[in-house]
Amino acid sequence: MSLRAWLTDFSKGDNLGLFWWLYRRRSRAKSRLARDIATFLLNRCAHRHGGYVGPGAVIQGRPELPHGLHGVFISRYAVVGPGCRIYQNVTIGEVNRKAPVIEDGCWIGAGAVLVGDIRVGRHARIGAGAVVSRDVPDCATVVSQPPRVMERGDGHGVQYDGHRPGLAGD
């Protein structure tokens, strides 16, 4: 990679080489002081890139992050398998200290939310904007359900008929 390409990637926040190097060093740290320093530097680096990877998260291999760490939140209890592709603004969150286990080769679309004690099978695909709180079998595709209107009203308990008084053409 040329120096120009490296500088461009680094300035956009897409170059996460230092981040993953620090992540691996922290997991191999022998002393508490070295682990704390690595955690501090990781948090600063993640903040610069706009994301968060919890200190206890298990990341096997190096996930593909096409948009960098921008908006990606990975809980400290999460397990992410090798070869996963994670797009921007993905949340892998926890409920009662239990977080998802994502097996290898998964694809997680932009804005997806995975929460709770769930397992996402090998080569599963999570669509953009999907909210996943149940297990996903191997090679399955999960997409968000269409939005539903729960109640029609104008906000004051009166039914709204589509006519707005006071607008031009009334």
Image (tube, grey):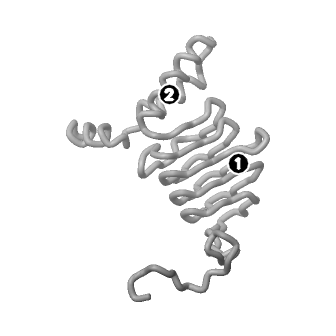
Q: Residues within 10 Å of mark 1 (few under 14, many from 20)?
A: many
Which quadrant, please, contains the N terminus?
top left
Q: Which residue is mark 2?
A: 42
At 61% from the left and 34% from the top, the residue drawn is: 54
* Residue 141 visible here: no
Q: Is residue 47 above or below residue 115?
A: above
Taking depth in this image into account, of 69 and 60 the one nearest to the observer is 69
Q: Position of residue 14 (x, y in %)?
A: 37, 43
Q: Is residue 142 visible?
A: yes
Quarter of the figure that contains the C terminus: bottom left
- Residue 158 figure quarter: bottom right
Q: Does residue 22 lie above or below 31 as drawn?
A: below
Front-most of 145 and 65?
A: 145
Position of 75 compared to 13: left or right? right
Q: Residue at x 37, y 39 (%)?
A: 15
Under mark 2, the amino acid is: Leu
The kind of residue on which mark 1 rests is Pro
- Residue with the mark numbered 1: 100
Please, what secondary structure does the residue beneath circle 1 have? loop
Cα distance between the residues tagged 1 and 2: 22 Å
Q: Is residue 23 left or right of residue 147?
A: left
Quadrant of residue 133 within the rendered picture? bottom right
